[in-house]
Image: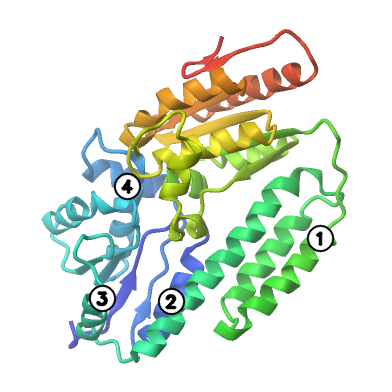
């Protein structure tokens, strides 16, 4: 690997490719960093063609990302996920690509024997020349950038539907992403303070009877807009204030015990991956008086399937409607739009005191 120029790439998920690209450019100054292409129908077509039919759609999106990167000349692939969607399938993804005849080095951060020492050794083997302190500072940059993005986007989701000047949040968001490509590690805190002030200065017209909807579910489907037909924007365009706690910052925190404690009336142990988080966040949203919950998952996602009975119990006990949406390569956007519109109409009627509806795992009843 040292005798040829490294061309490094990785999967796409939301906007997190931005700090990852910057970090890799710092750590591998002599390498070419190949950011993942925007996800398109071609990405999914490639991933579906070479993946097992029954596997979840995030797996297929990843395989499509990898094939596109390899076709562009990448010879090092990073599997950046730490949850079950990425971790369990890392070995299979690598084998599929090897069987297709691609020659590359696959670095999977979710393998069980990954440690700081082993990661640093692999970094050296790939030709990385930076010190351990630079590695640490770059890691802090990635974590800090992700936190700034997540905090901005959390506020944006809550308020974007009510901005006086349409496009104000989106324009400011684009500026933030541009600045994160250039900011120094020491400048992250002041950068966030600047954008927090700018966010507070955006003029809003919030109605008192606005719908508040919480989003829960598996991490990839929630965080990658193409995996859920950009559902968040559909909700915002419908005049809803939405909340989503599942993001990279949340995943990097220690939350498993806290989630199980919050969900203790419905779960005795974790159903796997982020299933307990989905239940705990639904309980929290219900206590905060949210109008409804949308549970999003990839088709066949076992942890979220295991969490569904608990979510149904929360819906019944706490009186909060839940719409369960499952996404795969055959999901139709028109059908999704119909269900989403019906759910929003039901929440509006419920909020205005029109006869009560119940929403179960099959939809409206």
Disc 3 from disc 2: Cα separation? 12 Å
Q: Which mark is residue 119?
A: 3
| Quarter of the figure with residue 359 | top right
Q: Residues within 10 Å of mark 1 (few under 14, many from 20)?
A: few
In primary-sequence order, the first of circles 3 and 1 is: 3
Q: Position of residue 313 (x, y in %)?
A: 48, 21
**SS class of the residue under badge 1?**
helix
Give the position of the C terminus as an image quadrant: top right
The residue carrying pointer 4 sits among few (fewer than 14), some (14 to 19) or many (20 or more) residues within 10 Å by Cα, namely: many
From this viewpoint, is residue 46 visible?
A: no
Say whether residue 343 is left or right of residue 90: right
| Earlier sequence position, callout 4 versus callout 2 | 4
Which of 129 and 42 lies nearest the eye of the viewer? Answer: 129
In primary-sequence order, the first of circles 1 and 4 is 4
Of labels 3 and 2, earlier in sequence is 3
Q: Which mark is residue 139?
A: 2
Mark number displayed over residue 85: 4
Badge 1 is on which residue? 200
Instruction: List x then y, in percent, for residue 46.
Output: 30, 47
Does residue 104 appear in the picture of this structure? yes
Graded by Cα atoms within 10 Å as few (under 14), some (14 to 19) or many (20 or more), the crowding at tag 2 reads some
- Label 3 neighbour load within 10 Å: few <14, some 14-19, many 20+: some
* SS at circle 3: helix
């Amino acid at each position: 690997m040292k005798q040829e120029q490294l061309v490094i790439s990785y999967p796409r998920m939301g906007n997190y490719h931005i700090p990852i690209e910057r970090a890799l450019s710092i750590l591998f100054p002599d390498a070419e960093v190949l950011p993942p292409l925007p996800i398109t129908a071609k990405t999914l077509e490639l991933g579906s063609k070479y993946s097992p039919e029954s596997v979840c759609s995030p797996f297929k999106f990843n395989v499509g990302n990898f094939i596109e990167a390899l076709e562009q000349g990448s010879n090092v692939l990073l599997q950046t996920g730490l949850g079950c969607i990425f971790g369990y399938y890392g070995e299979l993804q690598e084998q599929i690509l090897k069987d297709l005849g691609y020659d590359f080095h696959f670095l999977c951060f979710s393998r069980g024997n990954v440690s700081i020492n082993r990661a640093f050794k692999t970094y050296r083997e790939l030709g990385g020349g930076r010190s351990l302190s630079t590695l640490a500072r770059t890691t802090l940059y990635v974590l800090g950038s992700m936190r700034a993005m997540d905090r901005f986007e959390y506020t944006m989701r809550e308020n974007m539907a009510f901005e006086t000047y349409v496009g104000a949040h989106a324009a400011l968001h684009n500026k933030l992403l541009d600045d994160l490509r250039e900011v120094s590690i020491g400048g992250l805190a002041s950068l966030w303070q600047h954008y927090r002030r700018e966010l507070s200065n955006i003029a809003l017209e919030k109605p008192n009877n606005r719908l508040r909807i919480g989003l829960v579910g598996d991490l990839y489907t929630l965080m990658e807009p193409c995996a859920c037909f950009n559902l968040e924007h559909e909700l915002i365009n419908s005049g809803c204030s939405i909340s989503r706690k599942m993001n990279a910052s949340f995943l990097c925190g220690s939350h498993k015990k806290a989630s199980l404690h919050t969900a203790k009336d419905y779960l005795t142990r974790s159903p796997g991956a982020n299933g307990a988080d989905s239940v705990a966040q639904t309980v929290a949203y219900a206590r905060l008086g949210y109008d409804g919950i949308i549970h999003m998952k990839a088709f066949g996602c076992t942890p979220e399937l295991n969490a569904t009975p608990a979510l149904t119990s929360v819906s019944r006990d706490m009186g909060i409607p839940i719409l369960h949406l499952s996404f795969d390569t055959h999901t139709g956007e028109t059908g999704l739009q119909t269900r989403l519109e019906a759910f929003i109409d039901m929440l509006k009627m419920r909020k205005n005191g029109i006869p009560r509806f119940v929403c179960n795992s099959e939809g409206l009843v």
